[in-house]
Image: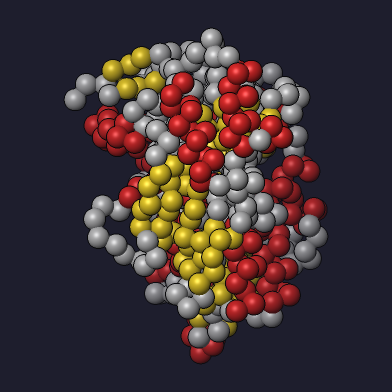
Amino acid sequence: MQVLEKDPIINSAFDWSAIGKQMSAIVGTRHVVQKREELITYECDGLTSYHDLQRPQLVVLPQNTTEVAAIVKLCDQQQIPWIARGAGTGLSGGAVPDQNCILIGTARMNKILNIDLANQRVTVQPGVINNWVTQAVSGAGFYYAPDPSSQVICSVGGNVAENSGGVHCLKYGVTVNHVLGLELVLPDGSIINTGGEIGETPGYDLTGLFVGSEGTLGIATEITLKILKTPESICVLLADFDSIEAAGNAVSDIIGAGIIPGGIEMMDNFSINAVEDVVATGCYPRDAAAILLVEVDGLTVEVEANKLRVEEICRQNGARNVTSASDLETRLKLWKGRKAAFAAMGKISPNYYVQDGVIPRTQLPYVLKEIGRLGEEFGYYVANVFHAGDGNLHPLILYNQADAGALEQVEKLGGEILKLCVRVGGSISGEHGIGTDKRCYMPEMFSEQDLESMQWVRMVFNPQELANPGKIFPTPRTCGEASRGNKEFKGIDRL
């Protein structure tokens, strides 16, 4: 198997004025963004610290599958690279424009197309906001389980592209576990349907293949989701500890006892105080080294039993205090701080860089200690907020981009944390994806043969490399420690 390298498809000779008129004929003039000052919005995603921010040449905002297919077909005919974008909340550079390209935004594709309570499914367009799904069915006693911290602003299409998780993914799984079927526009403009209205269908799992492909295999234009019945009872426990290691041990012991909570979240002292400064929940003890938020749900008798067992395990591991809440208002108050943790960092630091790695739960105490050591070595504070139950870490490195060389050092520190995760048997991403941010660390986790096999799959659907070029895979293969925005970018791996 031979991997050929060639220059990326960049055609400076594109007549963007003419292309804009052609796109306007498809979606209407008012839905094509071309003014340079208006394109600033689209030059970055939720991970805003880039060396070389680039605006797309134009943004097209379709409203339905037919318009998306026409846009993509035109791009295929004229060999124009394109990138799909949802709400722009991604944290790996996956929806960031690359060189001469157009950006296909799904903001106008925001309709809930069908609600089928009897069969527990909902069909939506990709621009529908995650939280809207639960709002649409909660009155009937249902909800949509995947709940990223950005669920009030992130779109379902973006969640599908990145295979997003959230607080409740420990018990209920990530996005792929809740997608029944997809309507897709492939990079040649053709339309296909994968999956269906039932949980399992014969043949290859093309739906599973597409979820998490980060826009490199096409665009989802209709998404059928599984919804769940609201649990009979829910209880949230907050336990505070004198050390992060003790909290980490409590997490392992809870799972080891055979209890699978709806979610287990951990925050360290730095995060606790940042949240209290901004959100002022009044619930998080400022002097705690770490807190655990543990949600147990299910039948009332089950919740009562698990609540007592979780409290007992936390106290056995040195918890100073354990409080619990079963009423909705107090439960939401306890979760409010965790959901606002990333935003809270913006008040105490000019910039922060968030990573997303996964480790075995049993390695939590060791890895958290190592992250602290790495932070001291590089000279930066690292706040830890993460899905402790499934070992999905979100270290937030605080820095000031105005300091010369700070971003490069922070990126290097982030890379060392990812390498640490791999060394202990983990992964370089749990839910944020690879994008441009982590593509150069893919060889830390995958062999050359692994990466080539992935490229074969990509080339089946995206042979011209027009769909989201330069994402996921190292470019070039020898990029090693190169960061996103690498000025030595020479080409895209081809098979």
Would residue 270 appear left or right of 247 to someone viewing this image? Answer: right
Q: Count the marks.
A: 0
Which of the pair 96/59 is nearer the observer?
Answer: 59
| Image position of 380 with respect to 432: above or below | above
Residue farthest along the left direction in this orientation: 1
Would residue 285 appear left or right of 396 to someone viewing this image? Answer: right
Residue 408 visible to an observer of this rendering: no
| Image position of 313 with respect to 14: above or below | below
Query: How has the structure been colored for display?
Result: secondary structure
Q: Position of residue 364 (x, y in %)?
A: 47, 53
Residue farthest along the top direction in this orientation: 13
Q: Position of residue 39 (x, y in %)?
A: 70, 28
Q: Where is residue 73 in the image (x, y as percent from the top left)?
A: 45, 32
Residue farthest along the front direction in this orientation: 25
If the image is split into quadrants, where does the N terminus sit? top left
Which of the pair 116/325 is nearer the observer?
Answer: 116
Q: Where is residue 479 in the image (x, y as percent from the top left)?
A: 41, 20
x 39%, y 20%: residue: 492
x 67%, y 56%: residue: 152
Would residue 312 appear left or right of 150 to someone viewing this image? Answer: left
Residue 348 visible to an observer of this rendering: yes
x 64%, y 18%: residue: 17
If the image is split into quadrants, where does the C terminus sit? top left
x 70%, y 69%: residue: 332
